[in-house]
Amino acid sequence: MRQIYYLIRKEFKQIFRTREMVAIIFGMPMIQMIILGFTITNEVKNVHLIIGDRDNSRISREIVRSFKNTDRFTVIAYETDINRISENIQEWNAQMALVIPLHFGRDLERHQTPEIQILMDGLDGNTAGVALGYAQAIMQRIARTLQVPEPVIASSSVVVEERMWYNMNLDNAQYMIPGIVVVLLTIISMMLSAMSLVKEKEIGTLEQLMVSPLKRYQLLFGKIIPFLILTFIELGLVMTFARLIFAINISGSLLLLGFLSFLYLFTTLGLGVFVSAITGTQQEAMFISWFFMVFMLLMSGFFIPIENMPPLLQHITYLNPMRYILAIIRDITQKGAGLRFLLTDAVPMTIYGIIIFFLAVVNFHKRTA
Amino acid sequence: MRKRIVAIARKEFLHIIHDVRSLVIIFAMPVLMLILFGYALNLEIQNINLSVFDFSRTPASRKLVNQFAASKYFSIRYEKGTPSTIDSLFLSKEARAALIIDKNFARDFRNAPTTTVQLLVDAADPNAASFIKNYCNGVIGRFNDTHSTTFPLPFEIKQRIWYNPDMKSAYFFVPGLIALILIMISALLTSITITREKEMGTMEQILVSPVQPNEIIIGKVLPYILLAFLDGMLILLLGIFIFDVPFEGSSLLLILLSIIFLMTALSFGLMISTIVSTQQVAMMLSLSATLLPTVMLSGFIFPINSMPVILQYLSYLVPAKYYITIIRGVMLKGNTLWQLIFPAMFLLILTAVMLRNALHRFNLNLEK
C-alpha cells in the first residue's frame, strides 16, 4: 500500500512539475467548452445574397424588402447582370442570388405567371436546402398578401402547440457539455496514462522501477490511480465551469454520474495500459491511442447522431464503449434519468470495461515478465 | 549547408520509417475516417419515433395521424396510457416526440377557427428537436392545405443550383476532411519532433554539432512535408474515386496551395514544439488546438456566416478555414489562383508569423 502511495506521489509531482501541463489540463476544458457551446448550430443565418431587381415595381420592391428584413439573409450587393452575379457566386462573395425579371409587376397583374429566378451555390447542400426553404416561405407570404381574401373559411386550421422537454430554449451548450466531459475523461485516462507508462520505457527508467522491490501490480496501480484521480478532478472542474458559464445544472444524481464514469474508466485505463504494453515510444503510444480516440469519438454520437447513420454503422457503434457513456452522461445531466433507465447502456459498458481491463493487465504482465 | 539539411532530414526520415505502426496509422487513419465520415455524416434525421395519444378517436383525428404516418420522417405508435407516461417514454428512448390530440378535437375542428394539438419533443438534442419541430409543422401545414382553399403562387420560382445540383453531402465533406486530416497529422507529427529530442536529452548532442538552428528546423520538417503530402494525395484520390467528387479546377494549383497549407500546419506544430518541453504536453496542445477548432470554426460542417460575430472573427485564426475555401473552390467551382488570392495570402501570412516565432523561440532555447 505504502509503495503504491509513493509511486502515486511521484507521478503527481511529475505531472504538476511541468507548468504547461497544468495550464493545459485546466485551460483546455474551458476553451473547448466555449467553442463548442457557442458554435454548434444547424440554424442557418446571414446567407449572403445578391438581389437583382430588373423590374423595380411596387411588388418587386416589396419582395426585396422582405428579403432585407430577415436575419436569414444578408444582402451584399444589388446586381442585375447575370455574368457579374455568377462571378460573385464563384468567388465566394455570395451564396445565393434572386433575380426578378423586367415587367414582373405588370405580368403579375395580367395573370401571366412571371418567373423569379433563384441562383444558389449548392456546395453546402444542407445550407442551400434550408436557404431555399426560407426563400420559398417568404415568397409564399407575399403571394398570400396579393390574393383577394376569401370571405368563407372552409374549415378550421390545426395549430401545433410545442413543448420542448429537458431543454426548453434549445440551448446547444446543454447538449454539448456532456460530450466534452466524455472527451476529457478519455483523453486524460487513456492517452495520458498510456504515454506516462511508455515514457518510463523510452527514457529507460522502467528498468529501475522493475528492479525495485515494487510488485508488478503495485507498479500498475501506481501508474493508473493518479490518472483516475486527475480524471475526477477534471470532471468536477468541467461541471463547475458548465454551471458558471452556461448555467447548466445536473438534473440527475451526481453520485450516479460519478459512479458510472468510474466504470467507464476501466475501459479507457485498460486501453491505456494495453497501448503502453505494445509500444516502445511515446510517439507510437500517442498515435495508437489517438487512433482509438478519434474512432471512438466519431462513432459515439458526439458530432453525428447515431440514428442518422446507415444501419451497418449503427450496429458497429454498439462495439464502442464511448457510445454508452455519452448516452449515460447526457441522460443524467439533461433528463435526470435514474439507474433504471440507464441499465441498457451501463451493463454493456461495464462488461466491456472489465474485459478490456482484464486483458490489458494480463498482457502487461506477460510483456513485462 | 545542403548536405547538413539532408543529413538531418535523413535521420528524421529513418526515425519515421522505423516506427512502422505509427506509419500504418498515419495512412490507414485518414482512409477510415474518410469512409466513415463520407457515409455517416448526415445531418438529416429520419424515422423519428412519434407516440400518439389520440383522445378524440374520430375520423378527423385519425386523418391527422395518417398524415404523420405518410411522412417518411415519422414512425407512429399509438399509446393507450395517459400522457403522464411520456417522461418514461422519452427516458427509455422509445419515443422522440409525442403528439397529444385532445378529446374535443373533432368538435373544435368543425366549429372553431383554430384547433390546437400538443406536440412534446425530447429536446435534449436541440438540433434534432428543431428538425422534428419543423417536420411536424410541415406535416400539419400539408394537412391544413388539404382542408382549406389553397393559394397557388401567382408567379413561378425557378431554382438553379450550381456546383452541387443534387446537394450531395460527400461533395461538401470530402474536401473538408482532407483539410482536417492534413492539419491534424502534420501538426501532431511535427509538434513532438523537437520536444522528443529535448526530452531524451539528444538535443544537446545536435546543438554541439556544427549544424545551424535553421538547418535543424528545415531538415526536420522536410520529411514530414513529404509524408503529409502523400497522405493528402491519398485522401484526395480516394475521395475522387469512392465518392465521385468532381475535380473542376487545375490540379497544379491545388498542389501548390496544398503545399502552402502543409507549411502552415507544420509551422504550427513546430511552434508548439519549440514552446513546450515534454511530448505529452506537445501532443495535448496540438490535439486540442487542431481537432476542435478545425471541426467547429473552419466551415467544415457549420457555416461560418451563421455563427456569433466573435467566433466569426476567431475563425480568421484557423488555417483550415482558408484551405477549405481553397480546396472546395478548386475542386468544385474550378476557381483560379486569382480568385483564391486572399485565402492563399492569409495562409502565407500565418505561416510566416508562426515560422518566425518558432525559429525565434528555438534560438532563445539555444542560448539558455
Image (cartoon, coloured by chain):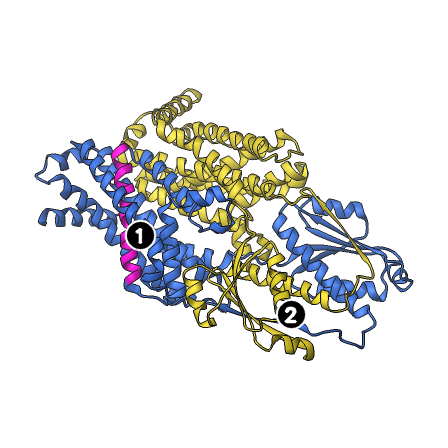
Chain colours: A blue, B yellow
Assess whether residue A292 is covered by the magenta stretch: no
Q: State whether the magenta stretch is mostly helix, strand or loop.
A: helix
Taking the magenta stretch, the answer to whether it contains residue A262 is yes
For the view shown, which residue lies furthest in the bottom direction?
B111
- Amino acid type for the residue under numbered disc 1: Val
Dot 1: within a 10 Å radius of its alpha carbon, few (fewer than 14), some, or many (20 or more) residues? few
Instruction: Tell me where residue A246 appears, x and y as whole percent.
Output: 43, 65
**Image quarter of the N terminus of chain B:** top left
Q: Is residue A114 left or right of residue B56?
A: right
Residue B132 position (above or below residue B322): below
What residue type is disc 2 on?
Answer: Ala
Q: Is residue B267 left or right of residue B254?
A: left
Q: Which residues are magenta?
A: A256-280
Q: Nearer the viewer, mark 1 or mark 2?
A: 2
Q: Is residue A29 visible?
A: no
Q: Is residue B41 visible?
A: yes
Q: Which residue is mark 1?
A: A347
- Residue found at the very far left of the displayed protein: A213
Q: Position of residue A37 (x, y in %)?
A: 46, 59
Q: Mark 2 sits on what residue?
A: B60
Query: Which quadrant: the C terminus of chain B?
Result: top left
User: Which of A41/A11 is in front?
Assistant: A41
Q: Between A151 and B356, which is closer to the camera in this rendering? A: A151
Q: Which mark is residue B199?
A: none
Residue A8 rendering spot, x and y as whole percentages:
17, 49
Q: Exactly how many numbered labels are in the figure?
A: 2
Secondary structure at numbered mark 1: helix
